[in-house]
Every structure is written in structure tokens, then in C-alpha cells.
């Protein structure tokens, strides 16, 4: 722009120089033309006419004494004597003069040409053309400059857009850089775009992994039935899962441990873990449910947090209870026949019993001894099944053969009680562990005899379902089981009615052995019973 401006001034100078030359020539020619008319009587009119046409020229006619005789711009009468003016004196001396001077009269810079005729004729002109030309050129250049700037601005805008747009697009859509987009951009920025695309893809992958991981974690914490809690040293909750709210019976958003519980035992244990800075585990009962609580101090950016898990401990507690009950039951079941045996043996050994009593006592001792053996036998079976260590061998057996043999074993009892035993057994062969399977069926069949009424019936059905699975039904017309007791008959040592079964060989372990065997073989057992009418056990066989 500056260069353009300087050039324009220079051009202006050049152009004004040539304009001045032209003007001088014109002035010179005019001078000659007017002096030719000096002798005419209408000379002053001619001067007037000329001035009118050439208003940019000032014509002055000066007498040889310096007095102004005519002037096209001023009233000549009021004008000073020009005798001492340079152009006058030079023209008087040399016949011609040209001179540049500031005109005080019209207050501008003037170019004067004077020539001597009869008098002195002077033509002058303002050199303002020089100034105008510069202004004209400067203005032109300025305008050109503005246009150039606008055009440059538009073009640089387009050019910059082509470079900037891809970068803007990337920042707007960093995960959507297509290959076409890269191909369509400048060669110079393509490597950068390729690198950005690679990095964003990597980031996206990492982001996806992180999202999936987060989702998995939150799915786990949301759905896990254990209660999970993460608290800081001030008991503010950083993580809480829905199970915790269920455990503590809360349903609103909880921010602090104090909003969740004021259980003193729990809070003391939490403080203990905080102070000792070590893992603390303990059992606690919250809202009538037993929990095992695990508190672990963990560090997050040097800040101590406690991770607390509440695990439902009801099963374990129940297991413990059952074990305690079982031990007590075993002791009792072993102790009572032994006490009876000891008592009668003592009586016999004291010599106080007579011959007849001794026989009777011996019978009782024998019966109690057998009961003891049965109980021990059943306990051994159960403990074997509990261990589950024995590898189970499978062989093919025929159901009809198995049941005929079981029934034969109990024939004396069946005859004694006058029971009608019928079989509706299809020709079914199953693959099973023979000894366990016989134990299972024997226990149920024996119960059908034991808990039957005299002259009652037992029906054994064995068939295959539509889906091909075999099932066995052992149905009796016996004493039946009250509905509320049905669920408990598989418990160890459970006897529905001790008084009613005192005359029978009963340990309360038979059906727990059945349940265990069924579990080991993968069978299910259903019981249907109508109190005082009869019971049906259905064994569903999974081969
Ligand atoms: P038990 O050695 O006393 O027979 P079980 O475990 O075999 O022990 O049976 C548990 C209890 O279930 C029995 O004491 C009896 O009260 C009841 N029970 C089992 N089978 C039958 C049945 N077929 N009819 C009625 N009650 C039965």
C-alpha cells in the first residue's frame, strides 16, 4: 500500500509536470495570439472574450510604467504598480519572462508568462493542477488499495477456509473423519489428519472399553444381592447399591452413613476399621436378617475409604443351627436305646428279675439294639452321602425286577398287615446306581407299609412321560401327612407324630437319605398327601 502510494505520488508528479508543460505551451500560444491583436481597437474586448473562454487563465495588461491597464480577475484600477515585479522587469529587459510565484493578490501559487509588445502582456495560471493530480492519484490508488484489500480478504478467506475448515470440522466431529474427507483436503495436512484419525479411533476404542467396563461394574453392583457401600473418613457415601437400601429398608437417596443407619454396633466396627486401618469382619443382625459384614480400608489418591460388603448369612446361620440340632438329635437317638439297654441289662444282672421277666427284658434289649443299629446304619449312609466322595457307578436295571425284589423283602410285614400291593410297571430299564436306587425306593416303599392302615393298599406305577422321562409313583392308603408337615418330612430326625410311630421301626432319617440320594442321582421327588387318606411319592428320573 505504501509502495503504491509513493508510486502514485511519483506518477502524479510526472503527470503534473507534463500537464504544466502543456499548460505553458497553451499559455505561450495564448500570449502570442493576444499580442497579435494588441493593435486592434477592440483589444480590451478581445482580452475579455478570451478570459471568459479561458477562465483558468489570468490575463493582465501592464503599461510600460508598471501601471496595470487590464486584469481579468481584479479591478485593475485598484491594483498596485507592477513595475517592480520580476516578470515585468524581465519582460521589459529581455522581451519575455516566465516565473512562478505566490500571488498575494489572489492568494495562490501562480505561473506567470509575460511578453513585451506595446506594453507588457502577462498570462498567469494557478498551479493547483499539480495538487489536484496528486489528490486524484492518491484517491485512485487508495480506492485501488481498498479494492485490492477486499479482493485479497475474500481470496485469503477462501484459501484459509480450505485449510481451517478441515481442522474446524475435526474439532466439531473428531470421531467422524472419513477417508474421503482426508483425500479431499490439502496434501500438506493429510498426514496430520491421518494421525488425528488414528488417535481418535484409538481413543474411541479405549472409551468404548471404559464404557463397557463401567457398565459391567454398575450392572454388577446394581444387581448383586450383596449390599455394597463405599464411604470416606467423614462417613460420606461415595458408592451405594440398591441392595444396601433394601437391607436397611430405605428408599430415598442417601448421602451419609448416618442417613442410612444409627446401628451402634455397626458404627463402632466401622470406626475400628478406620482407626486400626485394617480389615474387620463380623456378624450382625439388621432388620431380623443375619449378615456377615466385611470392612476393607482402601486408598483413593491418598484418601482413605472404607469398602463395606453385607453378605446375607441366613443360610450359614441356619446350617449352624441344623448342625447343632443334628448333634443333639444324634446324641439323643443313640442315648435313649442305650439307656434302655443298660437299664434292662442291669436289672437282669442284679438277679432281681424272674425267668419270665428276663425273657421279656432280653426281647426289649434286642429290639433297642436293632434300633440302635438301624440308626447307626442310617447315619453312616447319610455321612457317606454327605461326603459325596464315593464315585457313583451306573448300571442298567429293570424297574419291575427292583420293585418285586423290594416287595419280597417286606412280604412278612405285608402279610402281617394284610396289605394289597399292586404293580403297574412298564418294561422300563434305566441307567442308575443300583445300590443307591434300591435304598431310595426301599425307604419310600417301607414307609408306605409302615404308615399304612391294616388291610390298606399300596400301588406302584412306573411309566415314561410323553417327553420320555421315566417316573415312579408309590401310593398308599395310609395315615397321610398334614399339609403343614409335608415340607419337613425330609429333615433329619423329623418324625411327624412320635406317639403314633413309637411301635414302628423309625429313625426319622429315611427320607433325608432319600433326599440325598435323589440329589446325588439328579432325581426330583414330589409328595402328595391327604391326611388320614394316603400319600403318594413320585420319583422323577433324569437319565
Ligand atoms: P422314619 O424313619 O420315621 O420313617 P422318615 O424320614 O422315613 O423317617 O420319615 C419321616 C416322617 O415322615 C415319618 O416319621 C412319618 O411321620 C412321615 N412319613 C413318611 N412317609 C410317610 C407315608 N407314606 N405316610 C405317612 N407319613 C409318612
Image (tube, rainbow, N blue to C red):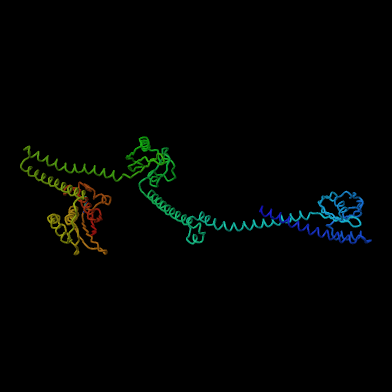
Image spot of residue 231 (x, y percent): 40, 41
Residue at the limit of the structure toward the top, as seen here: 275
Residue at the limit of the structure toward the front, as seen here: 94
Looking at the picture, tell me which residue is in the foreground, 509 or 428: 428
Instruction: Reply above or below: 358 against 167.
Output: above
Image spot of residue 328 (x, y percent): 21, 41
- Residue 29, image quadrant: bottom right
Looking at the picture, tell me which residue is in the foreground, 356 or 459: 459
Looking at the image, can residue 422 be seen?
no
Image spot of residue 95 (x, y percent): 87, 55
Residue at the limit of the structure toward the left, as seen here: 355
- 247 vs 459, left or right, is right
- Residue 281, image quadrant: top left
Image spot of residue 93 (x, y percent): 87, 52
**Disc count in the image?**
0
- 52 vs 208, left or right, is right
Classify the position of the C terminus by image quarter.
bottom left
Looking at the image, can residue 69 be seen?
yes
- 178 vs 220, left or right, is right
Instruction: Reply above or below: 410 against 305.
Output: below
Looking at the picture, tell me which residue is in the foreground, 252 or 482: 252
Looking at the picture, tell me which residue is in the foreground, 162 or 232: 162
Instruction: Reply above or below: 238 against 174.
Output: above
Amino acid at each position: 500500500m505504501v509502495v503504491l502510494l509513493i508510486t502514485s505520488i511519483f506518477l502524479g508528479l510526472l503527470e503534473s509536470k507534463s500537464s504544466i508543460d502543456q499548460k505553458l505551451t497553451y499559455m505561450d500560444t495564448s500570449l502570442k495570439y493576444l499580442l497579435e491583436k494588441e493593435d486592434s481597437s477592440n483589444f480590451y474586448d478581445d482580452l475579455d472574450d478570451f478570459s471568459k473562454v479561458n477562465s483558468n487563465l489570468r490575463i493582465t495588461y501592464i503599461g510600460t510604467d508598471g501601471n496595470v491597464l487590464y486584469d481579468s480577475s481584479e479591478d485593475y484600477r485598484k491594483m498596485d504598480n507592477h513595475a517592480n515585479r520580476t516578470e515585468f522587469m524581465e519582460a521589459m529587459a529581455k522581451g519575455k519572462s516566465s516565473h512562478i510565484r505566490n500571488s498575494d493578490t489572489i492568494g495562490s501559487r501562480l505561473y506567470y508568462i509575460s511578453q513585451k509588445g506595446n506594453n507588457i502582456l502577462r498570462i498567469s495560471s494557478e498551479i493547483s493542477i499539480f495538487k489536484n493530480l496528486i489528490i486524484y492519484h492518491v484517491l485512485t490508488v487508495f480506492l485501488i488499495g481498498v479494492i485490492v484489500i477486499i479482493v485479497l480478504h475474500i481470496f485469503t478467506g477462501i484459501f484459509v477456509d480450505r485449510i481451517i475448515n478441515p481442522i474446524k470440522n475435526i474439532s466439531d466431529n473428531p470421531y467422524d473423519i472419513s477417508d474421503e474427507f482426508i483425500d479431499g483436503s490439502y496434501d500438506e495436512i493429510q498426514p496430520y489428519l491421518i494421525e488425528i484419525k488414528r488417535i481418535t479411533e484409538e481413543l474411541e476404542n479405549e472409551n468404548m472399553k471404559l464404557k463397557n467396563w463401567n457398565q459391567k461394574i454398575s450392572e454388577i453392583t446394581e444387581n448383586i444381592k450383596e449390599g455394597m457401600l463405599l464411604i470416606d473418613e467423614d462417613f460420606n457415601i461415595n458408592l451405594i447399591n440398591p441392595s444396601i437400601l433394601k437391607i436397611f429398608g430405605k428408599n430415598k437417596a442417601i448421602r451419609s452413613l448416618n442417613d442410612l443407619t444409627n446401628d451402634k454396633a455397626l458404627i463402632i466396627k466401622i470406626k475400628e476399621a478406620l482407626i486400626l486401618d485394617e480389615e474387620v469382619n463380623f456378624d450382625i443382625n439388621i432388620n431380623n436378617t443375619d449378615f456377615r459384614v466385611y470392612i476393607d480400608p482402601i486408598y483413593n489418591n491418598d484418601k482413605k475409604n472404607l469398602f463395606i460388603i453385607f453378605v446375607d448369612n441366613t443360610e450359614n446361620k441356619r446350617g449352624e443351627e441344623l448342625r447343632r440340632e443334628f448333634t443333639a438329635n444324634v446324641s439323643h437317638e443313640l442315648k435313649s436305646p442305650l439307656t434302655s439297654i443298660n437299664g434292662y441289662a442291669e436289672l437282669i444282672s442284679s438277679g432281681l428279675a424272674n425267668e419270665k421277666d428276663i425273657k421279656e427284658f432280653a426281647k426289649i434289649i434286642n429290639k433297642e439294639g436293632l434300633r440302635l443299629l438301624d440308626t447307626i446304619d442310617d447315619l453312616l449312609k447319610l455321612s457317606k452321602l454327605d461326603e459325596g466322595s464315593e464315585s457313583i457307578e451306573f448300571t442298567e436295571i429293570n424297574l419291575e425286577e427292583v420293585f418285586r425284589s423290594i416287595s419280597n423283602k417286606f412280604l412278612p410285614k405285608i402279610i402281617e398287615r394284610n396289605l394289597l400291593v399292586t404293580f403297574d410297571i412298564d418294561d422300563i430299564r434305566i441307567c442308575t446306581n443300583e445300590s443307591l436306587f434300591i435304598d431310595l425306593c426301599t425307604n419310600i416303599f417301607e414307609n408306605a407299609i409302615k404308615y399304612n392302615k391294616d388291610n390298606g393298599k399300596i400301588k406302584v406305577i412306573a411309566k415314561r412321560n410323553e417327553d420320555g422321562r421315566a417316573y415312579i409313583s408309590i401310593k398308599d392308603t395310609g395315615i397321610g401327612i398334614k399339609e403343614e408337615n409335608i415340607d419337613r418330612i425330609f429333615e433329619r430326625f423329623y418324625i411327624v407324630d412320635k406317639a403314633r410311630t413309637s411301635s414302628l421301626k423309625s429313625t426319622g432319617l429315611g427320607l433325608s437319605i432319600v433326599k440325598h440320594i435323589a440329589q446325588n442321582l439328579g432325581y426330583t421327588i414330589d409328595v402328595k398327601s391327604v391326611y388320614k387318606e394316603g400319600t403318594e411319592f413320585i420319583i422323577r428320573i433324569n437319565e
